Amino acid sequence: MKQFRPYHFPPLAQFIAAGVAKRAQSSSSSSTTSPDEDWQSAIADGYRQGQREGYEVGLDEGRNDGYDAGHAEGVERGVAEGRQQALTELEQMAKPVDAMLRSLKKLKTEFRNAQRKEVVDLVGKIARQVMRAELALQPVQMLNLVDEALAAMPPTRDEVEVFMNPEELKRIQELDPKRARKWNLMADPTLDLGECRVRAGDHEVDAGCQGRLAACMAQVRDSLDSSAREDAE
């Protein structure tokens, strides 16, 4: 803001001299007043004239200073309001863009989730086909699953019973009768090919392929989910 300058009045003597001259002229026509009265009157006239001129000059300078200060303040306020209005308009313009970006991010996440599910389903499907083909060629491998299941069970002296699909049981007995006699193999029509239950006393475990495949696929799914979280970070 512009600083106000102090106004310096003209020398009082100037106005006094002017007043004296004026009084001198008037005294030439009339000599009814005394010299002291003329001096005091001249001082008063000079003071009033100086005050009037000083007021007019001060008023002009004050008006100019006020205009400059008001103009500067108006410019500053206009810039601030313009900036705020521009920011508000930009925020309004950015809202649709932000919504679109959120939608794209959501679609991207859903697409990746769908891809992971498809990968898991495809791996599971291929694994089941491989196991079925392997068991069809070598059904005796079911007994290897029985050995693994028994190794995971608590030691027991109870008789071990192995339940499996009747068709698969028949093929095992035909292909490896000696090994088949090692276990108490029992037919269970409710079991699908490749499924097997092992029971020893009060303990029973699922030794079939589906349970193992489900555990394996769970690990695959967890691995894919972990990779997706790392990519998101």
Image: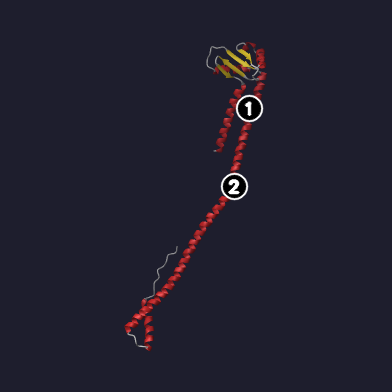
Q: Is residue 215 above or below residue 7?
A: above
Q: Is residue 27 above or below residue 52?
A: below
Q: How many marks?
A: 2
Q: Residue furthest front?
A: 32
Please state the horizontal and vertical placement of residue 217, each as a whole percent of the image.
60, 27
In the rendered view of the protein, which quadrant contains the C terminus?
top right
Tag of residue 124 = 1
Side of 57 where 183 appears, left or right: right
Q: Secondary structure at mark 2?
A: helix
Q: Residue furthest bottom?
A: 29
Disc 2: which residue: 97
Residue at the image position 60 percent from the left and 42 percent from the top? 103
Side of 14 where 91 appears, left or right: right
Res 170 → quadrant: top right
Please state the horizontal and vertical placement of residue 65, each as a whole percent of the image.
45, 67
- Comparing 220 with 56, the one in front is 56
Q: Is residue 14 something that shows in the picture? A: no
